[in-house]
Image (spheres, grey):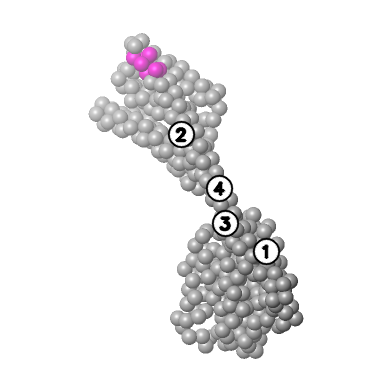
C-alpha cells in the first residue's frame, strides 16, 4: 500500500473514528465508577482492564496502520464478553450498576465490524456480544425493553460502522485508481513531449548534416564536418539506448540527456552510457542534471581535452543513482579549488541541498573523475 494513498487515509479515519467511539464509552464508565462505585475495587479493576485493552488495540492499529486480527478479537472477548460477568460476580447486581460495562459492547461491535474482513467473523462477534449481554442483563431483572434497546445498540453500531468502512474503502480505492490514471497520463504526456524534442533535435542535427552532405553543401572529409558527424553519431547511439531507460524513468533519462546535449552544443564530445535508471523526484533529477552540466562545463573550461565520458547507473534495485563524469585532461589538485566557486558551489553544494553527494578525484596530469550520488 502506498504511503498517503486513498485506502490508507480511509483506514486512518476508521481507526480514529472507532477510537473516539471507544473513548466516549470509557468516559461514561469513568463517570459511573466515580459517582456510584468509588469504593468498589472490582469496578476500578474492570475499568482499568477496559482501558488497558483499548490502549493495546488502538496503539497497535496506529503503529501498523490497521487493527489486525488478534487485538480486536481480544477486545471482543475480554471487554465485550468477560467484563459484564466479572462485574456481576463482584457484587454489582442491579441493572444500573452494570450499564456502563454493557455500554462498552457497542464500541466493541463497531470495532469488530471494521477490523474483521469476513462477514461471517463480524456476524460471529456481534452474535457473541448480543448473547453475552442478554445473558448478563437477565439476572439483574432488567426490563425486556432495556435489553432490546441495548441489543439494538450493539447491532446498529456494527451495521453503521461496517457501512461507513465499506463506503470509505470504496472511495479510497476510487481515488487511488484516479491518481494512478493521472500519473500514467502525465507520464505519457512527458514521453510524448520528449519524443517530439528528440524529433526536433534529429531534424536540426543529424538530418541537417546528412542533407548538407548529400546536396554537396558540406565536405564530408572536412575536420569540422567529421567532428560534427561524430557528435551526432554519439547522440544517435544514446538515443537508441535511452529509449528503454525512458520507459522506466522518463524524467530521470530526459534530465540527464539535457545535460549531455547542453555540453555537446558547446563543442564537447561526450560518450554517455545509461543503465537501469530509476525514476527520481523532480528536484533530485534536476539537481543531478545541473551538477553533471557543471562537471562537463569544467571539462570544457579547464581539462584541456574535448572529450568526456559520462555513465549514469541505477543501484540498489532502483534506490540510488550514480553519475560518473571522467576526462583524461590535465587534472588538478582539488584542495586548491577556491571556495564558493566552480565545483564546490555548483556541484557539491547543489548535490547536498538535494540530499545527494559529490566526490572529486583528480591529480595534476592524471585527468579528473567526478562521482555524483543520490541519495547520499
Query: Callout 4: helix, strand or loop?
Result: helix
Marks 4 & 2, CB-CB < 8 Å contact? no
Report the residue at 38% width, 27% height from top: 104
Which stretch did the figure color magenta? 146-152
Q: CA distance from mark 3 to mark 1?
A: 15 Å
Q: Earlier in the sequence, mark 4 or mark 2?
A: 2
Nearer to us in this view, 358 or 240 = 240
Q: CA distance from mark 4 to mark 2?
A: 25 Å
Q: Earlier in the sequence, mark 2 or mark 3?
A: 2
Query: Is 219 above or below relative to 169?
Result: below
Nearer to us in this view, 130 or 282 = 282
Query: Is 282 above or below relative to 169?
Result: below
The residue identified by callout 1 is 239
Nearer the observer, disc 4 or disc 2? 4
Q: CA distance from mark 3 to mark 4?
A: 12 Å
Query: Callout 2: helix, strand or loop?
Result: helix
Asked if residue 101 is among those painted magenta in the image, a careful observer would answer: no
The disc placed on residue 168 is: 2
Amino acid at each position: 500500500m502506498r504511503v498517503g494513498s486513498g485506502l490508507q487515509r480511509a483506514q486512518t479515519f476508521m481507526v480514529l473514528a472507532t477510537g473516539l467511539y471507544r473513548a466516549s464509552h470509557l468516559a461514561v464508565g469513568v463517570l459511573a465508577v466515580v459517582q456510584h462505585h468509588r469504593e468498589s475495587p472490582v469496578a476500578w479493576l474492570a475499568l482499568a482492564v477496559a482501558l488497558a485493552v483499548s490502549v493495546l488495540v488502538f496503539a497497535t492499529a496506529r503503529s501498523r496502520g490497521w487493527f489486525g486480527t488478534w487485538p480486536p478479537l481480544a477486545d471482543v472477548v475480554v471487554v465485550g464478553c468477560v467484563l459484564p460477568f466479572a462485574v456481576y460476580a463482584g457484587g454489582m447486581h442491579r441493572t444500573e450498576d452494570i450499564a456502563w460495562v454493557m455500554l462498552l459492547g457497542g464500541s466493541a461491535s463497531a470495532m469488530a465490524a471494521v477490523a474483521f474482513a469476513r462477514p461471517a467473523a463480524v456476524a460471529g462477534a456481534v452474535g457473541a456480544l448480543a448473547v453475552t449481554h442478554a445473558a448478563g442483563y437477565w439476572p439483574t431483572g432488567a426490563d425486556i425493553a432495556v435489553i432490546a434497546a441495548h441489543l439494538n445498540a450493539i447491532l446498529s453500531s456494527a451495521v453503521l460502522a461496517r457501512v461507513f468502512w465499506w463506503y470509505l474503502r470504496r472511495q479510497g480505492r476510487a481515488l487511488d485508481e484516479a491518481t494512478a490514471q493521472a500519473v500514467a497520463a502525465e507520464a505519457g504526456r512527458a514521453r510524448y513531449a520528449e519524443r517530439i524534442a528528440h524529433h526536433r533535435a534529429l531534424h536540426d542535427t543529424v538530418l541537417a548534416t546528412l542533407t548538407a552532405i548529400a546536396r554537396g553543401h558540406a565536405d564530408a572529409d572536412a575536420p569540422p564536418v567529421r567532428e560534427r558527424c561524430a557528435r551526432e553519431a554519439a547522440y544517435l547511439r544514446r538515443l537508441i539506448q535511452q529509449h528503454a531507460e525512458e520507459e522506466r524513468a522518463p524524467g530521470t533519462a530526459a534530465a540527464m540527456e539535457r545535460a549531455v546535449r547542453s555540453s555537446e552544443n558547446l563543442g564537447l564530445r561526450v560518450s554517455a552510457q545509461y543503465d537501469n535508471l530509476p525514476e527520481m523526484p523532480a528536484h533530485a533529477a534536476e539537481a543531478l542534471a545541473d551538477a553533471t552540466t557543471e562537471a562537463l562545463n569544467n571539462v570544457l573550461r579547464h581539462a584541456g581535452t574535448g572529450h568526456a565520458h559520462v555513465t549514469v547507473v541505477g543501484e540498489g534495485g532502483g534506490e540510488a543513482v550514480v553519475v560518473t563524469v571522467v576526462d583524461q585532461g590535465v587534472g588538478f589538485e582539488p584542495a586548491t579549488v577556491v571556495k564558493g566557486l566552480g565545483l564546490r558551489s555548483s556541484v557539491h553544494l547543489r548535490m547536498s541541498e538535494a540530499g545527494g553527494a559529490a566526490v572529486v578525484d583528480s591529480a595534476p596530469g592524471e585527468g579528473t573523475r567526478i562521482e555524483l550520488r543520490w541519495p547520499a
